[in-house]
Image (cartoon, coloured by chain):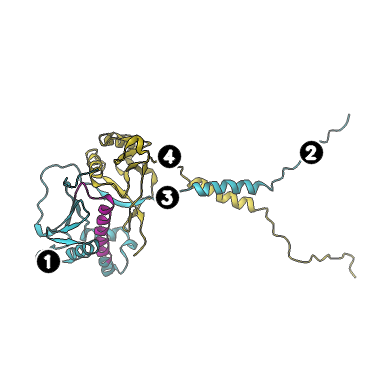
Amino acid sequence: MAKSKRTIPEINAGSMADIAFLLLIFFLITTTMANDQGILNILPPPITGPPPPVKEKNVLKILVNANDQILVEDKLYMKLDELEEFTEKFLKNNGVDPELSVSPEMAVVSLKNDRGTSYNFYIQVQNRLRKAYNKFRNELSQEMYGANFADLSEAKQEKIKEKVPQRISEAEPDDIGGDL
Amino acid sequence: MSKFKTRRVKGTPAISTASLPDIVFMLLFFFMTVTKMRSTEVMVKIKIPKASEVTKITDKKLVHYIYIGQPMDAGMYGTGSRIQVNDAFILKSDIPAFIETERAKMPEYKKSMIITALKADVKVKMGIVTDVKKQLRDANQLKLMYYTNKKGKK
């Protein structure tokens, strides 16, 4: 009987790299990295009881109409850049100007839009308001701790947040522009 | 004279590519683990607005999406803005039920942490967005994120 001397031939692994590359490229192009980002907003809880009393001068009234125009304090017509500046001024006022806020702790920004306001413009307004707040917080943290707000520890951030609470309240919108 | 002649090899030796598959596999596994396949097919036209003051969400599992925009298939669904969740158009009155199902997917301790991400087109009017917001409020889902792309510094 012949000795069966079967040896398994070696599998050539040279093309392994090619196969792996193919898969790699497939996953590379299908990957979407975690980039969930946006303007985080905490909605007010469903209404219970009357709103807390707030002094008129501590409220920055902002109206955005259906034509994407801004009216501040019922009398000033503004562009986005001016709004940012004015919000900062309003926050930092500390009772200097009798028509603006008494202190940053008390300040409230009231934003009211129309049903016909475009979403993009609304986001831009929200963005500018937040920018004003963040700028002020940053300045304060530089003053108190000599570092940027984002680099502070959580406890320190909380302290600054207590001093400059971000209060952006939103009123029920009007329906003048109509919605589509 | 030595008995063994040392054979000098001229030139540089070839670089071994034997470890190349290993390296590629390593990369492959990395991308395989971080890849999240797109689960819903977006049926509305969406151009995300840009903003600079953004917050990043690290835990993707907490997020669910609501899409608002003009339907791609305008012949079938019209040109008005529509709300889409999970591969289907819904009415605004269906939003609380949607939130409830999203909550039910979460373990108990995470139920209050879920975030609604609103992906709306730049051209959408605030009216429909406000309606969605109102429904979310009624459903007691208060964490809302306006999904935006990062704007470069001016």
Q: Looking at the image, is mark 2 or mark 3 nearer the viewer?
A: 3
Q: In this rendering, does residue B26 appear at all?
A: yes
Crowding near pointer 4: few (<14 within 10 Å), some, many (20+)? few
Residues rendered magenta in the picture: A113-138
The three-letter code of the residue at mark 3 reads Ala
User: Could you give the CA–CA distance between mark 1 and mark 2, rounded to whole angstroms?
Assistant: 93 Å
Q: Looking at the image, is mark 4 or mark 1 nearer the viewer?
A: 4
Label 3 belongs to which residue? A34
Q: Are marks 2 and 4 in contact (CB under 8 Å)?
A: no
Secondary structure state at the residue bearing disc 3 = loop
User: Could you give the CA–CA distance between mark 1 and mark 3, rounded to whole angstroms?
Assistant: 44 Å
Q: Can you tell which chain is drawn yellow?
A: B
Label 1 belongs to which residue? A95
Residue at the front extreme, as displayed: B75
Query: Numbered disc 1: what chain?
Result: A
Question: Which of the numbered marks, if any, corresponds to residue B39?
Answer: 4
A27 or A71, which lies in front?
A71
Question: Which of the numbered marks, if any, corresponds to residue A7?
Answer: 2
Say whether mark 3 and mark 2 are on the same chain.
yes
Q: Please provide percent x and percent y for residue B105.
A: 36, 36
Crowding near pointer 1: few (<14 within 10 Å), some, many (20+)? some
In the rendered image of this protein, which colour is used for chain A? Answer: cyan
Residue A126 belongs to the span the image colors magenta: yes
Please tell me whether the stretch drawn in magenta is mainly helix, strand or loop: helix
Query: Numbered disc 4: what chain?
Result: B
Query: Going from the N terminus, do you reach mark 1 or mark 2 first?
Result: 2
The three-letter code of the residue at mark 4 reads Ser
Q: Are marks 1 and 3 in contact (CB under 8 Å)?
A: no
Question: Looking at the figure, which quarter contains the N terminus of chain A?
Answer: top right
Q: Are marks 3 and 4 in contact (CB under 8 Å)?
A: no
User: Could you give the CA–CA distance between mark 3 and mark 4, rounded to whole angstroms?
Assistant: 14 Å
